[in-house]
Amino acid sequence: MKRYAIALILAILLLYDPVYLSGNENLQVQETSGSDDIPEYIMQMIEKYPETEVLIEYYNEIINDTGYFSKEIDISEDISTDDVPLFLQWDKRWAFLKYGSETVMATSGCGPACLSMALCYYKKGTPMSPKAVADFSYLNNYYAEFEGTYATLFTEGAASLGLIGVSFEKDMERIYQYLDEGKLIIALMGYGTFTYGGHYILIKGYDENGCFLVNDPNSLIKSLRGWDADTIINEAKQMWALWI
């Protein structure tokens, strides 16, 4: 019965394009026929983003773990170095935990994941996991069902958490300047290389060729290489600089 209950809860969630929600992209997920079935919203995400196939394994593990939804999230190892941590929104520790009341971190948690990375980099003494940031976002009205994470999470929300967040017009020289000053940048990406709809990524630096280094909360693969500056500029819709 417990397995069925967990499966049913997960199955009735809505599927949103990862990270930034758009009303015309919401798809109703059908109920599964049994506890061993994989919810349709997981399969739809895998179809769009094959790298997330590991969610099948995670799902099969958590339906047998009655304590999953109440476990304390430990990110101490993630912040043990001086680097900006990479948090994937579909990390097993929080993939199936809710963001708001109608969706889960795996499908919609890119905004909180990006801000969490910045907070853990600048404020190691008081780190916040992506799920903790998601809860903060929802409780403080920086997130709306069927709309997604509001841009004010990276300005007003960031300020409440001890960071300075400033929106700026996308400009290549300014991006390099901010990175040279030790600032991090969150970018809302539009349709193209990183997403089919909208998606938040974090820009943390650039390499010797001037290619931007990113932490993409929806892709480990995309986070392990540099990206041509023109690609980022052309596909970005909005940007925010963050620092302490």
Image (cartoon, rainbow, N blue to C red):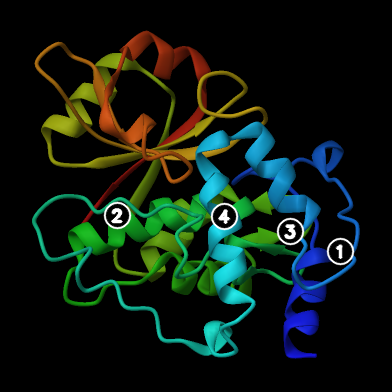
Mark with earlier residue (4, 1): 1
Q: Do the residues labelled 3 and 1 touch (CB within 8 Å)?
A: yes
Please state which of residues 81 and 119 is positioned toward the viewer in this rendering: 81
The residue depicted at 74 percent of the width and 68 percent of the height is 36
Q: Nearer the viewer, mark 3 or mark 2?
A: 3
- List the residue tagged with mark 4: 55
Could you give the CA–CA distance between mark 4 and mark 3, rounded to whole angstroms? 9 Å
User: Where 228 sits versus 71, above or below?
Assistant: above
The part of the image, by quadrant, that contains residue 213 is: top left
User: Where 79 sits versus 208, above or below?
Assistant: below
Left or right of 145 on screen, residue 52: left
Left or right of 193 on screen, residue 162: left
Could you give the CA–CA distance between mark 3 and mark 2, rounded to whole angstroms? 33 Å
Name the element at disc 3.
Answer: loop
Mark with earlier residue (3, 2): 3
User: Where 34 sits versus 225, above or below?
Assistant: below
Q: Horizontal and vertical percent for residue 206?
A: 18, 25
Please state which of residues 47 and 81 is positioned toward the viewer in this rendering: 47
Could you give the CA–CA distance between mark 3 and mark 1, rounded to whole angstroms? 7 Å
Name the element at disc 2.
Answer: helix
Q: Check residue 38 in the rendering and tell me which mark sits there, or answer none.
A: 3
User: Where 228 sits versus 24, above or below?
Assistant: above
